[in-house]
Amino acid sequence: MMCRTSGMPEPAGTGDEPNTDAVFTALLEDSAEDLYESAPCGYLSTMMDGTIAKINSTLLDWLGLDRAEVVGRKRFPDLLTVGGKLYHETHFAPLLRMQGELRGIALEMRRAQGGRLPVLVSAVLKRGSEGEPLLVRITVFDASDRRAYEEELLRRRQEAERARAEAERARAEADEARRQAEADRARLADALTVLQRSLVPDSLPVVPGLEAAVHYHTASPDQLGGDFYDLFPVDGGRWAFFLGDVCGKGPEAASLTSLTRYTLRAAAHHDPEPTSALATLNAVLHERYTAGGDPRYCTCIFGIAEPGGPDGSVTVRIASGGHPPALVLRSGGGAEFLPTPGGLLVGVIPRAPIATAETVLAPGDTMVLYTDGLTEARRGPRRDDLYGEDALRAFAAEQAPASPRELISALTALLSGFGDGLDDDTALLALGAPAADGPDRIRPTTRPAS
């Protein structure tokens, strides 16, 4: 609804166009003083020394100041922050005097209640008839939104740069960590190889009248195996041998393996009787671990072989501590387990019952000791589909008669056939009396690579 100059409403659509024009003219007729005081920007005029001579209500409202305390009492630099004052004295005022005008200078003004008001300032010199400077007219625009926008852009750019720098640093750290891990893995593999060789012999000694062969499979190249074996001389032409498996994996298992191996060697030289050697090992492990609340144990077969029988036979006496039974292949064919009843895990109780079993290996006979990695290998995808002792006996019977080397070769091929189903360390040690008409088998036997 439009209004007449008298203020009375005039109905629309009367066709009185001259009256309508008069209404618009009245709306646009604003006094210069109102335009100055209520302008959407700040205005002020200063003397040449900066003393404020005039200031509009807009700028006073922005700064929270009263006209009486500003006009004639403050200089324009007094309205600025410390940094703004310094810029005014060193740049703003000198350039204005030289150029006569400045446009879009970014400054900050102080609010009476505290805080800062970012502004854009333009200034022009008013000169007299002879060109002398009389006063300075200054226009001030509120730049809060622009400053906030610029700060947001700067913040986002800094965040992007930080994110990019962090990503580059993360990539560099990942590359360095990968290189370090590869180097550490290589060093670990070398160290494990050296340590593993210290726990099991690389080769077996020459034993007159006795053939020996061995195979060792490590389930993981990154972990020390827990299986162990050895063959070494004792008194009177007799030879001690053992094979076993300690609980656990890694460095702790290696420590237990080392203690077990050297305890058995020392015990055998003191008293080579199998029951005595295992009893000594049981006492050492129980005292060292179980009695202190950290139970560790192993399974083990320890034996004494006496080669040189009148017919070339080898007498073998063995004792077992919770280990799978030895398997004997006869020269006439067939295979049978050599049971050792009564044996318990070594190191679990202070005094473990240990029994001895004895057999004679005639020429062409072979006895094999093995760890449970062989019998517990998986034949299929199911976890409970294990190879087992019955299948092992049937396989051995098919190989008989076989020399230790022949039997170890056949068992090595069997292990390879399990693929991923062979997920535990496996040690094999075969001893036999050389066949009377066989080739000379008495020479050093190197452990095949797994």
Image (cartoon, rainbow, N blue to C red):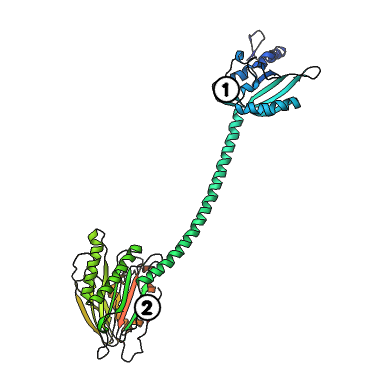
Q: Which mark is first along the chain, 1 or 2?
A: 1
Which residue occupies the foreground of this view, 86 or 131? 86
CA neighbours of label 2 inside 10 A, class few (<14), some (14 to 19), many (20+) = some
| 40 to 247, vertically: above or below | above
Name which residue lies at 57% across and 26% down: 116
Q: Secondary structure at mark 1?
A: loop
What's the amino acid at mark 1?
Arg
The relative height of residue 404 versus residue 2 in the rendered view (above or below) is below
State which quadrant residue 1 falls in.
top right
Q: Quadrant of residue 214?
A: bottom left
Q: Name the mark on residue 203.
A: 2
Mark seen at residue 126:
none
Q: Quadrant of the C terminus?
A: bottom left
Judged left or right of residue 53, residue 226 is left
Measured as percent of width and height from the top left, residue 325 is found at 25, 75
- Residue 46 appears in the figure: yes
- Which residue is farthest top? 6
Q: Nearer the viewer, residue 229 or 27?
A: 229
Label 2 is placed on what type of residue?
Ser
Kindly identify which numbered label has been placed on residue 111: 1
Task: Tell me which corner region of the image, top left, top right, bottom left or bottom right, holds residue 394.
Answer: bottom left
- Report crowding for label 1: few under 14, some 14 to 19, many 20 or more residues within 10 A (C-alpha): some
Image location (x, y in percent) of residue 314: 26, 85
| Relative horizontal placement of residue 18, taking residue 82 as reference (left or right) | right
- Give the residue at x 58% y 41%: 157
Give SS at disc 2: strand
**Toward the viewer: 144 or 50?**
50
